[in-house]
Image: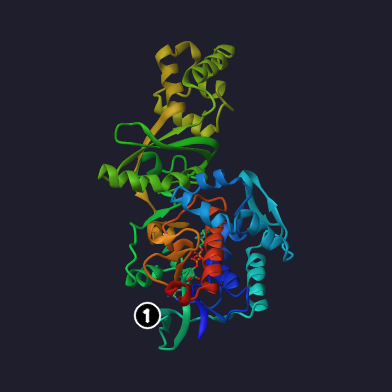
Amino acid sequence: MYQTIVIGGGPSGIMAAISASQNHQRVLLIEKKQGLGRKLKISGGGRCNVTNNLPYDEIIKNIPGNGKFLYSPFSLFDNQSIIRFFESRGLKLKEEDHGRMFPVTDKSQDVLDVLIAELQKQHVEVLENSPVSAITASDNHYTVTLENGKEYEGRTVVIATGGTSVPHTGSTGDGYDFAKVFGHTITDLFPTEVPIRSSEPFIREQTLKGLSLKDVALSVLRKNGKKRITHQMDMLFTHFGISGPAALRCSQFIYKEQQQQKRQDIQMQLDVFPDMNEEEVKQKITKLLKEQPDKIIKNALKGIIETRYLHFILEQAHIDLETTYHHLSVQQINDLAHQFKAFTFTVNGTLPIEKAFVTGGGVSIKEIIPTTMASKLQDGLFLCGEVLDIHGYTGGYNITSALVTGYVAGYYAGQFTYDSIEA
Ligand SMILES: Cc1cc2nc3c(=O)[nH]c(=O)nc-3n(C[C@H](O)[C@H](O)[C@H](O)COP(=O)(O)OP(=O)(O)OC[C@H]3O[C@@H](n4cnc5c(N)ncnc54)[C@H](O)[C@@H]3O)c2cc1C
């Protein structure tokens, strides 16, 4: 009889197994695939953005999917605990922009190695290549059954099976079915942090393909044309639509607007001069043009923004690239400033959930005790990581959530007794 059986060998399950075994409890970690932490290994482009150094409030803001739920688990284990965990075990971390923390070696394998070494140090038994097919609860214990028919018994179980994105890593959504058996609700599942599709002519014709714009403001519009969300970051035009940090952050709101507007086509807006208002942009353009009134417009405005985008926006504003300031009307300059500030285009959705960095939705957090990660519906059952309805932007927030909830789930699963409940 194990004290705790953890299902899922991603960052959340590994951390749960580590913390469950802290007081020499017998812990079993079961992973479907050969090799632990497959998603962790490809995270952060193979560098693993393992956490974020920003203050709590900023971290929570960057976890639009129920980030506030993490305040409670943070009181036991937070982003600083993650940093200490790795650094005290010999893996130094470095901070990059926006508080993002990476191993100094730039290798996700080194993050995984620290976690695996800790599992070994604490004598956690690990089964790989062992998909779990069922969890059943009987009197004061659980039976976990593998696809090959083998059974294991534990006083507590931690479900840490991840979401459904990038399924070749092993995360295929099995945990939702396990949780449902115990009466848990699975909220609507949707792709987040995923590129956005558009069939606008300029995308189909690949006019801007490969063009990346720095520090622009990208917005998702509501039905009434008001902005639902804006993200000011870099973005990239691709052969099917848009990608890059700003687009990834906007992606979940495309899904949400599609649900709300009950249609596929959603409007987005791009502002390439987010730190100026439209009047200031107009003045900037006018000043440049007045200084070189005889130059053709595409040359007079050269350098104001990436050349391909300049030409594209001039076309959107119906301005001949070869014309000069002398032939431009005030209205045309106004239109140009407006296009720079509010180029509006239609998108048709995102790439599917399988291609998403993160799964939105999951086991409802209303049914989880935030201080312990215990199920409110089933004694001795704990859940953590991406299987829960918690999702963050890219920037280290998802692994943070996985490690934090994993630590807390394991901590309480490792010391759980049924006597305490009965008493
Ligand atoms: C390409 C990519 C890059 C990313 N980069 C970052 C990043 O740099 N920073 C960041 O914060 N987040 C990043 N993320 C998100 C982050 O990796 C995940 O949120 C995180 O791995 C979730 O951890 P988890 O342990 O909950 O789930 P997972 O890592 O998905 O692990 C779940 C594990 O459970 C196992 N499992 C599933 N079903 C069963 C079963 N039936 N029996 C046994 N085992 C099972 C799976 O095989 C898997 O190993 C990235 C995601 C992707 C796809």
Three-letter code for the amino acid on which mark 1 is drawn: Thr
| Element type where label 1 sits in the image | strand
Q: Is residue 371 above or below residue 38?
A: above
Residue found at x 28% / y 44%: 260
The percent position of residue 346, horizontal first and vertical second, equals 34, 39
**How many numbered badges does the structure rendering display?**
1
Is residue 278 something one can see in this rendering?
A: yes
**Which quadrant would residue 403 be assigned to in this image?**
bottom right
Is residue 241 something one can see in this rendering?
A: no
Residue found at x 41% / y 31%: 343
Q: Which residue is mark 1?
A: 136
The percent position of residue 381, horizontal first and vertical second, equals 43, 71
The percent position of residue 422, horizontal first and vertical second, equals 42, 74
Q: Nearer the viewer, residue 89 or 112?
A: 89
Residue found at x 44% / y 14%: 328
What's the colour scheme?
A: rainbow
Q: Is residue 118 left or right of residue 420?
A: right
Q: Is residue 400 above or below residue 152?
A: above
Going by the picture, which residue comes out furthest to the front? Answer: 423
Q: Nearer the viewer, residue 313 or 278?
A: 278
